[in-house]
Image (spheres, rainbow, N blue to C red):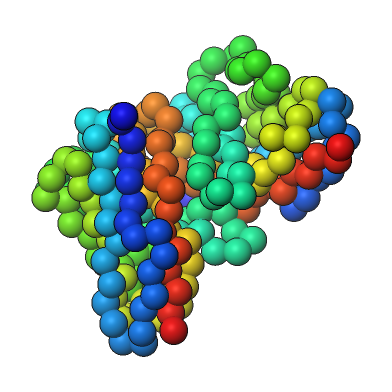
Amino acid sequence: DGGITQSPKYLFRKEGQNVTLSCEQNLNHDAMYWYRQDPGQGLRLIYYSQIVNDFQKGDIAEGYSVSREKKESFPLTVTSAQKNPTAFYLCASSIGWNEQFFGPGTRLTVL
Amino acid sequence: AQTVTQSQPEMSVQEAETVTLSCTYDTSESDYYLFWYKQPPSRQMILVIRQEAYKQQNATENRFSVNFQKAAKSFSLKISDSQLGDAAMYFCAYGASGGGADGLTFGKGTHLIIQP
């Protein structure tokens, strides 16, 4: 079955640690995205990538980093510079202007 | 920058009745895309309906339809014959055109409650 997988489902981070969230898709989509969702808020764009080895900052990129070495994979690293990382993180992919398909999300909590 | 506003934090409707969720947006572009996404308690984002701005005809998907008013920058979602499974958060989203897949701008959402 084609789709988007995110792992882990739940992630706990200690203060000062970097953590990496995984996102994999087998839909053969060129574009991939990372969004952050806070309670009572909509989704906000962190980073996006339209092609392998290229990515762009979204609206709230500070404290995050990404890589796009393979078409299928778009991992997100939450660095210690992100002061309030507790949130729900969603990965998505798309072909051009068709709908974005979303993964099931990762819940990150800072201890 | 584009903005999307959903003015109804919460809506409640009786099962089998019709409900309309409001969305307004701000853009200086003439060509763009608008979406309604549903997020049930599982938190999985599901596309409900999509509208291309260059199309005058309102999009329809079964019980879901939109009222797209381009001049007013309004994009409301109508759910007919509401069902218990429609209970969810609903997000309106804007996507810019221009050949690049630059990500979507989302509103803050409307929590839809279905009363049995």
Q: Tell me residue B75's x, y (percent).
A: 66, 31
Q: Residue pushed farthest bottom?
A: A15
Q: Position of residue B22 (x, y in %)?
A: 73, 38
Please identify the quadrant where the C terminus of chain A is shown.
bottom left
Q: Kindly identify the residue that appears in the image at 56 percent across and 48 percent down.
A: B42
Residue A85, horizontal then vertical, whole percent: 42, 73
Q: Is residue B91 above or below residue A42?
A: above
Q: Nearer the viewer, residue B95 or B78?
A: B78
Camera-side residue: A61 or A77?
A77
Q: Residue at x 76, y 30 (%)?
A: B83
Q: Quadrant of the N terminus of chain A?
A: top left
Q: Nearer the viewer, residue A10 or B3?
A: A10
In the shown orientation, is residue B101 left or right of residue B46?
Answer: left
Above or below, comparing residue A38 to residue B18 in the picture: below
Residue sitting at 36 percent across and 78 percent down? A13
Query: Residue B103, located in which quarter of the rendered image?
Result: top left
Q: How many marks?
A: 0
Can residue B107 be seen?
A: no
Residue A86 at least partly seen: yes
Left or right, B14 with reference to A17: right
Does A95 sit left or right of B91 as displayed? left
Determine the residue positioned at 34% across, 52% down. A6
Name the residue at the top extreme: B57
Q: Quadrant of residue A101?
A: top left
In this rendering, would B87 be left or right of A85? right
